[in-house]
Amino acid sequence: MFGWVRSLDFFFNKAKLRYLGLGLLLAWVYCTWFSHGIFLPGDGRLHETLHLSLLASAVGLLLLVFRPQKRMPLSPRIILVSALAVSITTASFFFLSSVPAIWVASVVGGFASSALWVGWGELFCQIDQDAAEASIPMSLAMFVMAAVADRLLPWPFAGVFSVMLPLISCLMLFLGRGEHPDDYEFPESIEPFSRVLPALVKLALCSMVCSFATGAVVTSFAREELLFGADDFIVFYAMGGVVAGLVSFFAFAHARRVNFSFIYEWAVPLIVFALAARAMDGPLFNTLSAIFACSASLYVEVLFYAIFALVTARRFCLPSETFGIFRAAAQVGFMLGGLLGSWVGSNNINITA
């Protein structure tokens, strides 16, 4: 591990802030594409770059599923280079004017982000389950604070803040991994990957459906359809983060056993409420629908990290396999849902008719 990372270890040790960087990585996505920090309202590049980034990230995640030496966590150099690439490509959105160049930057940044997603998954598999579960609500709290900070900052400072988020998340990831030896290896799986792959794909498809539903809802609104005319959607994601954090805290506190059904017992009602409120239409119900959809999206994204950490601890498969497949499915689902929602919004289609 880098020496400058170890020098910060004592400061973050007791607070365990090192485990909350997943919330900042999530905040990078939503602060970049659902806030005013980089893309101003009406900028047609927003949806194009978001969809390309999600697709490229999904490809990178699937490649990491089948990488060699999966028992070893990704090297610090790979993670650092990936974080730098994500931040640099995000910053390039400020000054790139050529559409092909912007597309290339979106693809490179999205592809590089896949290493950060898997890196956080590997870290949650290295720490004990109690610490992983406790980090989930707190990661959402970190996300909310980052979202609020981004919303309060004026342009272009909000964009600079978004650019820094992957680097800060990377630093916190290094701090978390500093507790483990550099030659750490995950235990060998008790089942061959080919045998557990069908089950993983089925579970990933469930997360894809959830992400598709939330992506379709949050991208289908016009500003005049909401109770208050927010300049960007990060306000609703901040509200959704509060709801998702409270739900996850309550769920972990009262669950007898954490498993996959435990996720859907809470995620599905949030999605149903979001769809039902969208169908009822009107500014009030549309606003509630947006908040419920954002809550479900964040809840599913973050909670799966604790669930798959448990799966890996039981040695059913390796972290890069579980988190790569899950995250890729979730991002493709949100991308497809976003395409549908954007089409509905751009064509002024009344989905409640």
Image (cartoon, rainbow, N blue to C red):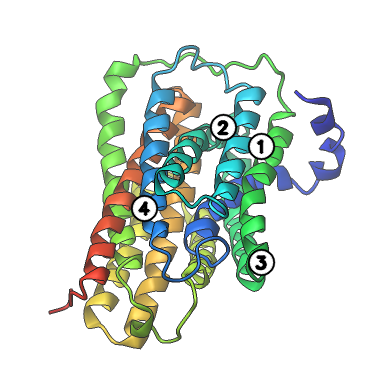
Relative to residue 291, is residue 169 drawn left or right?
right
Q: Nearer the viewer, residue 199 or 325?
A: 325
Which residue carries the number 3 mark?
149
184 w.r.t. 206: above or below: above
**Mark closest to the chain's N terminus, 1 or 3:** 3
**Mark closest to the chain's N terminus, 4 or 3:** 4
Q: Secondary structure at mark 2?
A: helix
Q: CA distance from mark 1 to mark 3?
A: 21 Å
Q: Secondary structure at mark 4?
A: helix
Residue found farthest to the front: 98
Query: Looking at the picture, which amino acid does disc 3 mark?
Result: Ala
Mark number, residue 48: 4
Which residue carries the number 1 mark?
173
When asked about the image quadrant of residue 141, the answer is bottom right
**Number of marks in picture:** 4
Which residue carries the number 2 mark?
119
The residue lying at 58 percent from left, 36 percent from top is 85
Circle 1/circle 2 CB separation < 8 Å: yes
Q: CA distance from mark 4 to mark 3?
A: 25 Å
Q: CA distance from mark 4 to mark 2?
A: 26 Å
Q: Secondary structure at mark 1?
A: helix
Residue found farthest to the left: 353
| Front of the two marks 2 and 3 | 3
